[in-house]
Image (cartoon, rainbow, N blue to C red):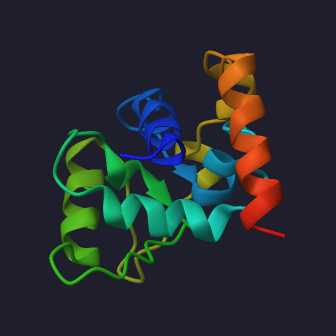
Amino acid sequence: MTEFQEAIVKAVRQVPEGKLVSYGQIAAYIGSPRAARQVGWAMGSIGDVPIFPWWRVVNKDGVITINNAQITPQLQKQLIEEEGVMVSDELRIDMRHFGYDLLTQAEPVAGEVQERLRLVEDKFFD
């Protein structure tokens, strides 16, 4: 697993049950604020190990947009609903009620890791 993927897993693990974040929030939290799309791609390539609550990540509008052959939007909806989150038939979640602010509520990312990720972002995501 890459450092980028490891940082994503650590960030997602900080999201409490019944709360959701966006791909962009994950990107900003790990020090790569312009890499929301890359966070989604990286999450899709992590595979089964390690287990982390991937279903707690949705798009910036609070919509389930997962696009994966093995993991369907309906599975993500089911997992989110099992945590008490209300999901509309259009796969939309009220982020004002169920959103979680990683930047203000979670443990900060270690400075050294954040700096390495910033260097990766500058090299590959401009």
| Left or right for 107, reference 122 | left
Residue shown at the point (16%, 52%) measured from the top left: 48
46, 27: nearer the viewer: 46
2, 32: nearer the viewer: 2
Residue 34 appearing in the image: no
Residue shown at the point (40%, 59%) measured from the top left: 43
Residue 84 appearing in the image: yes
Residue 120 lies, in percent from the top left, at 71, 51
Residue shown at the point (68%, 18%) measured from the top left: 108
40, 96: nearer the viewer: 40
Residue 36 is drawn in which quadrant?
bottom right
Residue 68 lies, in percent from the top left, at 28, 80
| Left or right for 91, reference 48 | right
Residue shown at the point (20%, 72%) measured from the top left: 71
The C terminus: image quadrant: bottom right
Q: Is residue 14 above or below residue 32?
A: above
Residue 35 is drawn in which quadrant?
bottom right
Q: Is residue 123 above or below residue 27?
A: below
| Left or right for 98, reference 73 | right
Count all numbered tags in the image, as a single digit. Answer: 0
63, 38: nearer the viewer: 38
Residue 47 lies, in percent from the top left, at 22, 57
| Left or right for 105, reference 92 | right
Residue 85 lies, in percent from the top left, at 36, 49
